[in-house]
């Protein structure tokens, strides 16, 4: 079955253009004009990916993103935020809200499809793993990562991670004490040949730490090595 993409955008001309191009590239499309509608649509349909405009009437794209992440059925759905603003700060805010990727308008169809393919490929790989349970759970002290079930626990308590956060943490925890630079972490999370800025990794790491600290205030196992990268400390 062709992957289903939910487009959340209030600008009719852009929706028409996106629908036309994405259908031509082999995707099925469902539309929502604002956040409320988007949250209704995801109950009926199960989109494989969400293209979410930042500037929406009533509820901002960021708020929609947060709400999608709070719901079990859309917790893991890849979300790409579209925005006319090009500022790095906004990008970080978008990723803080739980988006997987971020594209600044105007963008080329080729770039958009590349990003969509990359995220869907990653999802498929995660699902295949779940089906075959090829990968064994990774246990590092109080941390347990089970890629097959996309499950992360700390001291036996679940930590809800997005796919991107999960993959970054897995890359770090695979080799405790070993430093990974931002490029290596991005390759682990997004696959190679996708360029995302340095701040993106920092933002994901910040969110990861926050989620663990919410469960265990003393959590300090993800270490920053300034100018080098990050590492996972085992004990
Ligand atoms: Ca808009």
Image: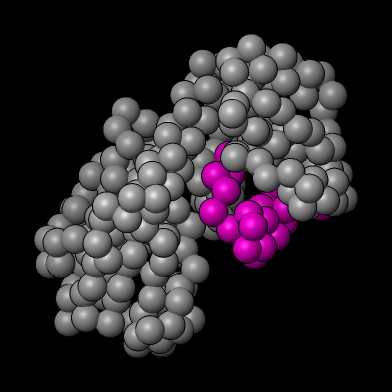
Tell me the quarter of the image containing the N terminus. top right
Q: Is residue 211 left or right of residue 134?
A: right
Residue 235, quarter of picture: bottom left
As rendered, which of 69 and 148 lies closer to the eye?
148
Would you say residue 55 sits in the magenta stretch? Answer: no
Q: Where is residue 36 in the image (x, y as percent from the top left)?
A: 85, 51
| Res 162 visible | yes
| Location of residue 134 with respect to 47 vertically, above or below | below
Q: Residue furthest front?
A: 132
Residue 233, quarter of picture: bottom left
Q: Where is residue 46 in the image (x, y as percent from the top left)?
A: 68, 45
| Res 83 visible | no
Q: Position of residue 157 (x, y in %)?
A: 43, 82
The image's colour scheme reads: one colour
As rendered, which of 109 and 139 lies closer to the eye?
139
| Location of residue 126 with respect to 26 vertically, above or below | below
Start-end of magenta stretch: 59-81
Could you tell me which residue is drawn at 32 percent across and 28 percent down? 193
């Amino acid at each position: 079955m062709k992957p289903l993409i939910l487009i959340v955008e209030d600008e009719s001309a852009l929706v028409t253009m996106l629908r036309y191009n994405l259908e031509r590239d082999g995707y099925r499309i469902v539309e929502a004009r604002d956040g409320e509608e988007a949250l209704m649509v995801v109950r009926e349909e199960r989109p494989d990916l969400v293209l979410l405009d930042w500037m929406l009437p009533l509820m901002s794209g960021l708020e929609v993103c947060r709400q999608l992440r709070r719901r079990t059925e859309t917790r893991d759905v890849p979300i790409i935020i579209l925005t006319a603003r090009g500022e790095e700060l906004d990008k970080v805010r978008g990723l803080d809200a739980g988006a997987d990727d971020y594209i600044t308008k105007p963008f080329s169809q080729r770039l958009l499809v590349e990003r969509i393919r990359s995220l869907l490929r990653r999802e498929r790989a995660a699902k295949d793993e779940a089906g075959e349970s090829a990968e064994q759970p990774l246990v590092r002290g109080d941390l347990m990562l089970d890629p097959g079930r996309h499950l992360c626990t700390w001291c036996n308590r679940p930590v809800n991670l997005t796919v991107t956060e999960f993959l970054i943490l897995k890359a770090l925890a695979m080799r405790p004490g070993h430093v990974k630079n931002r490029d290596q972490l991005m390759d682990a999370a997004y696959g190679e040949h996708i360029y995302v800025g340095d701040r993106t990794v920092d933002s994901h790491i910040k969110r990861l730490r926050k989620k663990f600290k919410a469960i265990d205030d003393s959590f300090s196992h993800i270490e920053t090595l300034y100018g080098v990268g990050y590492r996972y400390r085992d004990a």
